[in-house]
Image (cartoon, helix red, strand yellow):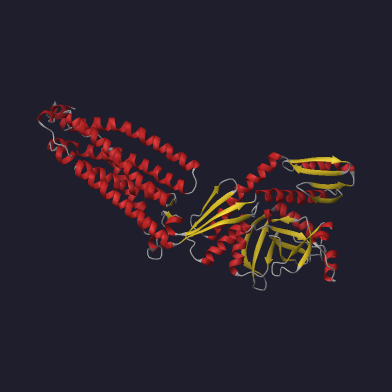
Amino acid sequence: MAKIHANAQKPFNYRLLAFIFACCFGIFFSIPSFFQDSTQYPFFTDKKKITLGLDLQGGLSLLLDVNVNEAVHNQYVSMLSEIKYQTDKRNIFINKLKMQNNTISFVLFDLSKEEDINTIMSKIDGAVWNKNGNIFSITLDEQAIKKVQKNALDQTIFTIRNRLSGFGLTEPNVLREGINQIRVEMPGAQSEEEQKRLIKLISQNAQLEFMAVDEDLARRMMNGETITDEEATRYGDVLLPYAENGLIKLPLKAIPILDGHSIVKAVATRDENNNDAVSFQLDSKGAEIFGDFTGRNVKKRLAIVLDKHIISAPSINQRIGGGSGIITGHFDEKATYDLAIALRSGALLAPVQVIEKRVVGPSLGADSIQASVIALVAGFILVVGFMIVYYAMAGVFASLALIINLFLIIAVMALFNATLTLPGMAGIVLTVGMAVDANIIINERIREGLRAGMGVIKSLRVGYENASRAIFDANITSLIASLLLYIYGTGVIKGFAITTGIGILASIVTAIIGTHGIYLWLGERIEKSKNTAFWFGIKLDSTQRMPANKSNVRK
């Protein structure tokens, strides 16, 4: 009977298969990350690899302050444009449409149109209006103002990310910091020229507006009459300078006809004179407004305004349909490329100001990498040395699992295009210790079984059963902590949380599943050898000798 069971087929060792798969997966997908320089290793250019963070490869770090109150002001300006367009479209005659102290007011000539005015107001989110005779006043309620401020901050983060991605920057880090501040980290931005372009691209509002020229007031200024800003305001105008010459100003109607929110496409191109320019395409509503205005104002001028500076003010020769146009000016190729990116990404709802600038040089990043690698390698060698000396072949298996654990961390981070920062390197070093701790618990439980005279096979089974419960409990709590750090942390804290979280999951695969698979494969050979000192680093006395193999054979 014993002989029949001894020759019976072994159960399928799925743990060993999983460990082999983890080895192949980790090594294959981690290799490109060791060849970061694409110029020296072009074969790995398009392969997924870990991106080095600002503190490891150098670059530019900015702290931006977002003026969310200006976003509320811009919302009122948009409401002005909407009211003007809707009343003109419905042939509702109003006068003295203006904004003052975050309140819009106008005079309605025909009170029979009051119901139409109420319909227009009701479509404006958060608008509160009241009437005093034929004078209407409109404001935003408190909830709407808070919503505008929050959206401005969120939209600024989203827009800056889009602009940097359009610029071609690899893995920029844009995170909220404090109440109204944003931290922008741009790894790899080394040259002074590139840094200046990036700062301008990020901080540029890119608020594009189409505004009508007040031809009567412009004619008076051409005849030598001096018009002040206060006088222009009384006419419902605003004096804005030309971008190419700030001393020359032009009176424009204060309420824009259209703004950049209607732009759906913007690309760098060239005009009919082969000069650098930016072509744009409006959405359907913007195209309708643009077409209606140009149709009613033939032979008049339309100013194209960018961030309160006039780019150009061409005359309208005919109705412009289709919603497409071109912006020309004194641009070079880089300026048109950056402007197209800014317009495509959208205007900032609130202006930003750079309040802190920090440049990390490539030499400092290289020093950080060198110091981190030295710490990792030194710690790894000491841990592996201790494991092999103290646990013999069991220490070798644990060290093999540790190596695969490191490959798995790098491979998973590369697949998800994660950014490795200095705290992330610290997380990897910590993970090495946590992974070894799991193997120590397992080996000690196995030794306890051997000392109790259980035999190798039973000691392995009982050891892994007892150790796994403690390891799983410890890893789950550590994983929860890493998850909370990632959710509520910012910047460097997230980098630390990512590496520790991935390392914990990888250690479960390698330490619990992988080494168990190796022991299941070699279990009978270990038991037959009876050399526990070689396999587990422990010598058994006569009272602790392994029992005869009969019970194990029957099993």
| One can see residue 322 in this view | no
Is 305 situated left or right of 435 in this image? right
Is 31 situated left or right of 281 in this image? left
Which of the 4 quarters of the picture holds residue 38? Answer: bottom left
Across and down, in percent, residue 357 comes to: 54, 58
Across and down, in percent, residue 205 comes to: 64, 57
Q: Residue at x 81, y 64 (%)?
A: 300
Q: Residue at x 41, y 38 (%)?
A: 479
Across and down, in percent, residue 195 comes to: 53, 63
Q: Nearer the viewer, residue 265 or 497?
A: 497
Looking at the rendering, in which quadrant would you find the C terminus? top left
Q: Residue at x 82, y 43 (%)?
A: 117
Across and down, in percent, residue 497 comes to: 43, 44
Is 381 situated left or right of 74 in this image? left
Q: Is residue 220 above or below residue 524?
A: below
Q: Residue at x 76, y 52 (%)?
A: 81
Q: Nearer the viewer, residue 5 or 155?
A: 155
